[in-house]
Image: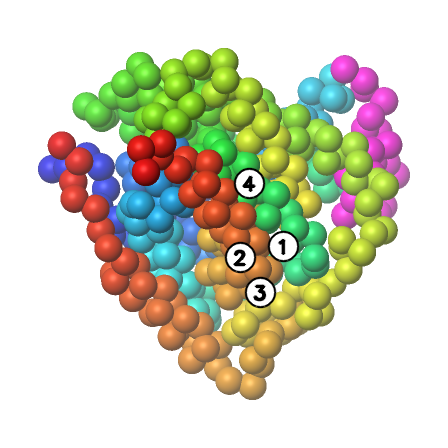
């Protein structure tokens, strides 16, 4: 048996997860949890960030407008992170670790620092890769928060429900990602 | 109960993303360069497959429409998507696949996550000053889908036709494109 999924098996497996999630609970999302982690750290460093409210309209409120929005939903999740969304993302880590343990395909040492397509163009310096990939992470999460979701929440879960926002988010994302990656990784030989 | 489901579904999602190689930046970047359509086939099929069964189960009243969440549409969705796309192209990771790649020991994915935490943090800091801006002006009424999902909460572009008749062909189209896109020969 091939360990790596064919595109069809991969598509069915991922599709099944998205379907079962919305069937039993709600659509899958990931990028919100980056805000929750930030909020947890921030609240440890300055405990006055989030305070308990009257409990009538909202349970927790925050001096930060983003954590306070929507009735302090994020603020509550920072205080009580053991909820569906956060545990889901932590469990994703577990699933991938499990897949790795059960797999004979090990990631090569070089690949752990940067993919080959990157090394072919930008060389083997891991520091250079780290600087670029930090900026990449910054842009991805900043963009996802502005958009209100990422590839899982907006694109996969959104397009599954035929959300207009999912389609236009995907158009925006691939609209920049495709031309930029073609230009950025253009091989030198051509 | 929700927590147990979160654990089971999260493990399944992480496992499937890894086995589908969605957490391999080589595969992502070569998909974006239109050199390797494996992941595009995976994504399109996953969307089509889940969508078809979602609307069938909705039509049969098996799935509670209250579980659906149609996210609002505003100009920030497209601009945010475009900003995300830049990082997606440079890094070869998105939030979910970055987490799953770091879990497999990819060091650059770990740095990606740190960058992501910084990006989300800066967004938290500036949100207060942009929340009243035109970035958040609703487009087409905000939370709108093409096929009808939950008329009490969300509007639909086509609301006088049964949802499955609209969503079904879209889903089949997605799956069809997944089949038609060229595959790649198995790497040795």
Label 3 marks which chain's residue?
A
For the residue carrying disc 1, how many other residues have a C-alpha within 10 Å: few (<14), some (14-19), or many (20+)? many
* Residue at image point 35% right, 48% down: B34
Horizontal and vertical percent for residue A65?
82, 38
- From the viewer's perspective, tell me whether residue B90 is left or right of residue B136: left
Name the residue nearer the viewer: A70 or B84.
B84
Distance between the alpha carbons at the discs numbered 2 and 3: 11 Å
Residue A59 drawn in magenta? yes
| Marks 3,4: beta carbons within 8 A | no
Discs 2 and 4 share one subunit: no
The residue that disc 1 covers is B78
Query: Mark 2 against mark 3, which lies toward the viewer?
Result: 2
Task: Report the Cα–Cα distance between label 1 and label 2.
Answer: 7 Å
- Write the start and end of the magenta stretch as one range: A45-71
Q: What residue is disc 3 on?
A: A164
Question: Which of B97/B187 is in front?
Answer: B187
Dot 3: element: helix
Which residue was labeled with disc 2? Answer: A171
* Picture layout, residue B62 above or below residue B162: above
Residue B74 drawn at (x, y percent): 70, 59
Instruction: Give above or below for B140 relative to B67.
Output: below
């Amino acid at each position: 048996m091939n360990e790596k999924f064919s595109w069809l098996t991969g598509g069915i497996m991922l599709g099944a997860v998205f379907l079962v999630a919305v069937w039993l609970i709600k659509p899958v999302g990931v990028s919100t949890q980056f805000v929750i982690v930030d909020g947890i750290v921030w609240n440890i460093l300055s405990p006055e960030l989030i305070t308990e409210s009257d409990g009538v309209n909202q349970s927790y409120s925050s001096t930060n407008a983003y954590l306070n929005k929507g009735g302090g939903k994020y603020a509550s999740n920072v205080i009580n992170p053991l909820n569906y969304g956060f545990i889901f993302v932590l469990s994703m880590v577990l699933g991938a670790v499990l897949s790795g343990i059960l797999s004979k395909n090990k990631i090569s040492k070089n690949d752990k620092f940067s993919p080959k397509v990157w090394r072919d163009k930008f060389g083997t310096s891991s520091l250079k890769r780290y600087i670029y990939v930090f900026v990449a992470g910054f842009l991805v999460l900043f963009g996802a928060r502005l958009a209100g979701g990422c590839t899982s929440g907006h694109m996969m879960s959104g397009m599954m429900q035929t959300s207009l926002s999912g389609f236009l988010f995907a158009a925006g994302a691939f609209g920049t990602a495709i031309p930029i990656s073609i230009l950025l990784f253009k091989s030198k030989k051509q | 109960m929700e927590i147990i489901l979160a654990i089971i579904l999260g493990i399944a999602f992480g496992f499937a993303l890894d086995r589908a190689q969605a957490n391999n930046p080589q595969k992502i970047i070569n998909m974006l360069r239109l050199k390797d359509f494996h992941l595009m086939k995976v994504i399109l099929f996953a969307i089509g497959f889940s969508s078809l069964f979602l609307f069938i189960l909705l039509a049969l009243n098996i799935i509670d429409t209250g579980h659906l969440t149609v996210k609002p549409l505003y100009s920030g969705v497209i601009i945010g998507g475009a900003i995300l796309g830049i990082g997606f192209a440079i890094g070869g990771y998105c939030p979910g696949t970055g987490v799953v790649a770091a879990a497999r020991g990819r060091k650059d994915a770990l740095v990606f996550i740190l960058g992501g935490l910084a990006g989300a943090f800066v967004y938290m800091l500036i949100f207060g000053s942009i929340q009243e801006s035109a970035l958040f002006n609703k487009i087409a009424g905000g939370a709108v889908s093409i096929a009808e999902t939950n008329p009490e909460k969300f509007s639909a572009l086509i609301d006088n036709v049964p949802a499955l008749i609209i969503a079904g062909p879209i889903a089949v189209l997605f799956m069809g494109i997944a089949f038609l896109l060229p595959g790649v020969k198995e790497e040795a």
